[in-house]
Image (tube, grey):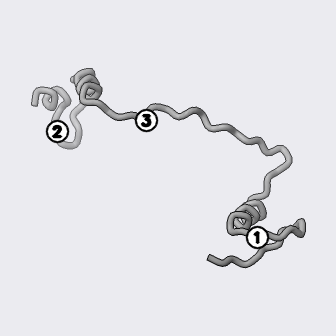
């Protein structure tokens, strides 16, 4: 892939596609002087594998006093099935 060499406001030229992308993002969305960087929180557990026991525990711990859904079945009836 060939890309045209770009020149930024500071007069610096780009040599690679990655430099082009970086320059375009900096020119399009310049950082302000008081801009703060935030670190992402540590990864949670949403990516862990779901076990059959976890599904069964969750299913059996639900309240049967919930209102029926659009299919007119209450959760108690679904548990019995």
Q: Is residue 65 visible?
A: no
Q: Which residue is mark 2?
A: 72
**Do the residues under discs 2 and 1 have CB atoms within 8 angstroms?**
no
| Residue visible at 11% across and 27% down in the picture | 80
Q: Residue furthest left?
A: 81
Quarter assignment of residue 34: top right
Left or right relative to 17: residue 12: right
Depth check, mark 3 against mark 2: the one in front is: 3
| Mark identifier at residue 46 | 3
Neighbor class of circle 1 (other Cα within 10 Å; few <14, some 14-19, many 20+) is few
Quarter assignment of residue 50: top left
Determine the CA span between mark 2 and mark 1: 64 Å
Front residue of this view, candidates 58 and 47: 47
Where is residue 52? Give x, y as percent. Answer: 24, 30
Tell me if residue 8 comes above or below residue 2 in the rendering.
above
Tell me which numbered mark, 2 or 1, is placed earlier along the sequence. Answer: 1
For mark 2, give the secondary structure: loop
Front residue of this view, candidates 35 and 8: 8
Q: Which residue is mark 1?
A: 15
Determine the CA span between mark 3 and mark 1: 40 Å
Where is residue 23? Give x, y as percent. Answer: 76, 64
Tell me which numbered mark, 3 or 1, is placed earlier along the sequence. Answer: 1
| Residue visible at 79% across and 57% down in the picture | 30
Neighbor class of circle 3 (other Cα within 10 Å; few <14, some 14-19, many 20+) is few
Quarter assignment of residue 71: top left
Front residue of this view, candidates 39 and 59: 39
Q: Is residue 53 visible?
A: yes
For mark 1, give the secondary structure: loop
Tell me if residue 37 comes above or below residue 14 in the rendering.
above
Tell me which numbered mark, 3 or 2, is placed earlier along the sequence. Answer: 3
**Do the residues under discs 3 and 2 have CB atoms within 8 angstroms?**
no
Left or right relative to 52: residue 18: right
């Amino acid at each position: 892939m060939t890309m045209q060499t770009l020149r930024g406001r500071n007069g610096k030229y780009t040599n690679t596609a990655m430099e082009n992308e970086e320059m375009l993002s900096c020119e399009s969305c310049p950082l302000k002087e008081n801009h703060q960087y935030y670190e992402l929180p540590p990864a949670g557990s949403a990516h862990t594998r779901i076990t059959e026991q976890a599904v069964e525990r969750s299913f059996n711990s639900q309240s049967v006093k919930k209102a029926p859904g659009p299919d007119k079945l209450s959760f108690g009836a679904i548990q019995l099935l």
